[in-house]
Amino acid sequence: MGRIPCCEKDNVKKGQWTPEEDHKLSSYIAQHGTRNWRLIPKHAGLQRCGKSCRLRWTNYLRPDLKHGQFSEAEEQTIVTLHSVLGNRWSVIAAQLPGRTDNDVKNHWNTKLKKKLSGMGIDPVTHKPISHLISEIATTLSPPQVPHLAEAALGCFKDEMLHLLTKKRIGFQFHQQFTNMTSTHNNAPSTSHVKHEENNNYKDNTIEKIKYGLSRAIKESEKNWETSGGGATSSNFHDNTGFSNYNFANLLNDEEGSPWNQSLCSGSTCTAGGGGLQQQQNKKISNENCEDSGKEIVVTTRNGSTTMFNFDCVLWDISSDDLMNPMV
DNA sequence: AATCCCGGCAACCGCGCGCGA
DNA sequence: TTCGCGCGCGGTTGCCGGGAT
């Protein structure tokens, strides 16, 4: 049995709402409330689907909505909650008065994701990208590493290109990479790389990333041999120039986002400089969760509440959970 | 001045959940 | 317990405006 459509598809208008339609809907809701969305368009004299009316009301017409730009505090709240909740936009929006899930989702997709990527942080896991590469390399047994690392490279290629094509960072990378190649004779030549030649630069960048990754893998294989395998926070030592570049430079970029100073909200990850070093120093352990965590209570629309402890969740994500934010 | 490209945002779509009969 | 309906959620699409070429 097929699902019954929410409204008759014929005689239903789609697309942008006109001011007249907005007025009709607002007036009707002001008088009669929002019970039974299916009937509202009919009674309000609108040739719209009830669902469309509901969306228009909840995302745009509701009088308690904020329409301006997101403040720094709001952005920080979104990032922090997203690190805990993942893409649960409605729950995140519930913590931001006047913002809708659609607002939050759009803002995340258009701004915040790029902002995090620009800081060298994977927006899905909220971990440093270099950390993830290292984690992949250290979690797997050596025979598997090259294939999966290659796959990971594909995942992060866009973010890396985004980082590397930023003017200043690109220049630093070029310098650093040149230094690296001078001591590693199996590295690809970069003598022909010119920043003005953006396309060539991007193409070479992929080779550089591959090279950096292969070095990370080599290093992790060493760690694997010496540590007996398994991924722990303690073997996150970026010995590669690539990885060090990738994060330290970004987080120490004085022109960068103000989040450099306080991405973490937990009480053991306080505001201030330090960036990567501070985060590396932060123990990734459930021991932190017991009594030092900063807690928030998230209340959903149906009234249920969930308490989150940021010290636990910001960094305590096992590799199994990378694509499945907890909760 | 015209065209192209891209980012931002509003709106749509399909699915899942909760509730009541 | 089951079924159907209504609603809410998250992913995706498409339009529009502004900047770049």
Image: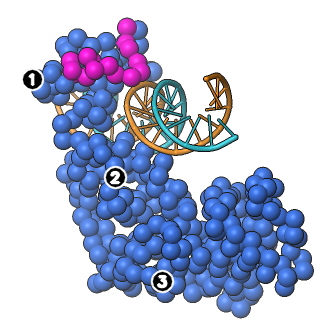
Chain colours: A blue, B orange, C cyan
SS at circle 1: helix
SS at circle 3: loop
Q: Decide: is A228 above or below B7.
A: below
Please name whichever residue, C21 or A327, is drawn nearer the observer in this view of the structure: C21
Q: Position of residue A178 (x, y in %)?
A: 80, 76
Quadrant where the C terminus of chain A lies? Answer: bottom left
Q: CA distance from mark 3 to mark 2?
A: 26 Å
Q: Residues within 10 Å of mark 1 (few under 14, many from 20)?
A: few
Residue A288 figure quarter: bottom left
Name the residue tied to disc 1: A31
Q: Chain of mark 2?
A: A
- Which residue shows up at 32% across the image and 72% down it? A309
Residue B6 figure quarter: top right
Name the residue tied to disc 2: A70
Name the residue tied to disc 3: A274
Magenta residues, start to end: A11-25
Q: Decide: is B11 above or below A244.
A: above
Image position of A104 (left or right of A307): right
Quadrant where the N terminus of chain A lies? Answer: top left
Identify the mark nearer the N-term, 1 or 3: 1
Please name whichever residue, A154 or A322, is drawn nearer the observer in this view of the structure: A154
